């Protein structure tokens, strides 16, 4: 019974994100993430990058154009199809990013933008090569003053990333 519930949860999440990428204007034409763009000089000249919940692939494309082999994991088939139309060179994995299927790999760069799932923090630490770069951006707990509808567990606490990584 647990496996059925997990599949139902995954189907529900996939449908939600597919719909967002089809209809929600906030998810259309998302540019390369500024954090990566402004720190392009820190990227290695070659190596492997992982984009967790990479959406429609603008940042994935940017990383690949800057010499990296890139894997983009996302739960949305719609988003990954659009990403592949933008650039078919990276590797695209349709999967729940909560369960990163990349155990034996190590990455020089990992990008995680607005996907806050604390259960993957340990996996990120294991697959990020020593000295590798982690680009991580999410909303802080302070957002509750502007958006009290967001569940506090979906928001970073102050210094949380520094403490974890």
Image (tube, rainbow, N blue to C red):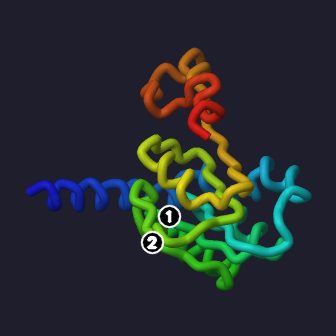
Q: Answer above or below: position of 77 versus 114.
A: below
Tell which of 111 and 15 is nearer to you. Answer: 111
Q: Earlier in the sequence, mark 2 or mark 1?
A: 1
Q: Would you call the spot at circle 1 few (<14 residues within 10 Å), some (14-19), or many (20 or more)?
A: many
Residue 17 on image: x %, y %: 45, 57
Viewer-nearest residue: 109 or 152: 109
Q: Kindly identify the residue that appears in the image at 66 percent across and 45 percent down.
A: 136
Extreme residue in the left direction: 1
Q: Residue 162, how many percent across, how many down?
A: 65, 33
Per the rendering, the mark at residue 94 is: 2
Check the image and report above or below for 118 versus 142. below
Residue at figure coordinates x 68%, y 84% from the top left: 89
Apparent side of residue 17 relative to residue 26 in the rendered image (left or right): left
Residue designated by label 1? 74
Name the outermost residue toward the front: 130
Query: Label 1's element?
Result: strand
């Amino acid at each position: 019974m647990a496996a059925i519930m997990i599949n139902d949860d995954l189907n529900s999440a996939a449908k939600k994100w597919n719909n967002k990428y089809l209809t929600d204007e906030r998810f259309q034409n998302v540019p390369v993430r500024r954090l990566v763009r402004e720190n392009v000089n820190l990227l290695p000249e070659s190596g492997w990058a992982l984009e967790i919940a990479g959406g429609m692939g603008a940042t994935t494309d940017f990383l690949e154009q800057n010499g990296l082999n890139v894997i983009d994991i996302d739960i949305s088939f719609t988003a990954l199809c659009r990403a592949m139309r933008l650039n078919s060179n990276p590797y695209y994995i349709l999967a729940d990013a909560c369960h990163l299927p990349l155990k034996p790999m190590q990455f020089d760069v990992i990008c995680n933008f607005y996907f806050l799932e604390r259960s993957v923090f340990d996996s990120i630490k294991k697959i990020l090569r020593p000295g590798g770069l982690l680009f991580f951006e999410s909303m802080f707990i302070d957002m509750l003053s502007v958006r009290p509808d967001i569940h506090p567990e979906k928001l970073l606490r102050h210094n949380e990333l520094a403490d974890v990584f």
